[in-house]
């Protein structure tokens, strides 16, 4: 079975995909496969590297090439979860030539809650440990439990930055949600709960589909 995980930035797509990977699914994240491709250093990887090093978005056709290369390395009987791809309708159409998408899990969460979650994130600049002042606060007043450094808020976790990312997401991805809804592939998941609560819903859906197959 091949599924796509869709949803706004910060909703926990990667976290849920990792949980599926722990159950034996193959997790394909766009960020990871682009990094792998650059490390490989072949012709394709070098092309990708040029964009990444200039800080530009990697064009659709290159992402599709990288994905194609990755899929060729994977046993075709595997269960695959795609995270971060497709992010627009053009990419969704390109994906159809590569792989059959069986279901699309749409992790739904409203913007205000995403902002609340992400602006609560703090990281340790020394060891990289991630905290959340609401759900996972450090035990000692804004200092890292592991190394004692003062925690900071990343530039990316500031409210104005998050609002901009959400705007881009809505513009690009809302048509994609509609596209998959029309195709009958879309399944909505309420992503407002905890990681475990969201994952329980995902697991239930997958078990349901497996029974129907
Ligand atoms: Zn630390």
Image (cartoon, grey):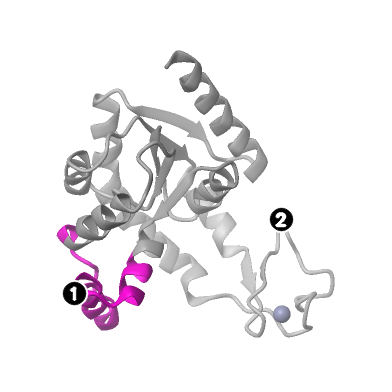
Of 62 and 118, the residue lying toward us: 62
| Direction right: furthest residue | 140
Question: In this rendering, which labeled residue sits more in front, label 1 or label 2?
Answer: 1
The secondary structure type at the circle numbered 1 is helix
Q: Name the residue: 29% across, 28% down.
A: 181
Magenta highlight range: 34-61
The residue depicted at 36 percent of the width and 76 percent of the height is 39
- Mark 1 near mark 2, Cβ–Cβ under 8 Å? no
Q: Position of residue 201 (x, y in %)?
A: 58, 30
Q: What's the distance in space between the residues labelled 1 and 2, CA to CA?
A: 44 Å
Q: Quadrant of residue 139?
A: bottom right
- In the picture, the quarter occupied by the N terminus is top left
Badge 2 element = loop
Q: Position of residue 9 (x, y in %)?
A: 43, 55
Majority SS type along the magenta span:
helix
- Would you say residue 6 is visible in this rendering? no
Q: Is residue 96 left or right of residue 87?
A: left
Q: Position of residue 166 (x, y in %)?
A: 38, 55
Marks 1 and 2, the one that precedes in the sequence: 1
Is residue 16 positioned above or below 205 on the image?
below
Can you tell which mark lies on residue 43? 1
Q: For residue 4, say whether it is visible.
A: yes
Judging by the rendered image, the residue that carries numbered circle 2 is: 135
- Queried on whether the Cβ of the residue with tag 1 lies below 8 angstroms from ligand 1, the answer reads no
The percent position of residue 118, horizontal first and vertical second, equals 55, 60
Q: Nearer the viewer, residue 108 or 39?
A: 39
The image quarter containing residue 36 is bottom left
Decide which of 154, 37 is in the foreground and name it. Answer: 37
Magenta span has 41?
yes
Residue 113 within the segment the image draws in magenta: no
């Amino acid at each position: 079975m091949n599924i796509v995980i869709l949803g706004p930035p910060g909703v926990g797509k990667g976290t849920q995909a990792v949980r599926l990977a722990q159950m034996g699914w193959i997790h394909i994240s766009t960020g990871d496969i682009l990094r792998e491709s650059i490390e490989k250093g072949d012709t394709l990887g070098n092309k990708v590297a040029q964009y990444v090093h200039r800080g530009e978005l990697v064009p659709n056709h290159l992402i599709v090439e990288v994905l194609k290369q990755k899929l060729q390395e994977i046993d075709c009987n595997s269960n695959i979860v795609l995270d971060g791809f497709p992010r627009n309708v053009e990419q969704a159409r390109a994906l159809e030539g590569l792989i059959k998408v069986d279901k699309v899990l749409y992790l739904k969460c409203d913007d205000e809650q995403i902002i609340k979650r992400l602006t609560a994130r703090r990281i340790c600049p020394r060891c990289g440990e991630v905290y959340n002042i609401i759900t996972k606060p450090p035990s000692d007043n804004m200092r890292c439990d592991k190394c004692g450094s003062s925690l900071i808020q990343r530039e990316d976790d500031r409210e104005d930055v998050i609002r901009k990312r959400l705007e881009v997401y809505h513009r690009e991805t809302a048509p994609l949600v509609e596209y998959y809804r029309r195709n009958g592939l879309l399944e909505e998941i309420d992503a407002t709960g905890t990681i475990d609560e969201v994952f329980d819903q995902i697991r239930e859906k997958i078990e349901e589909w497996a029974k129907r197959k």
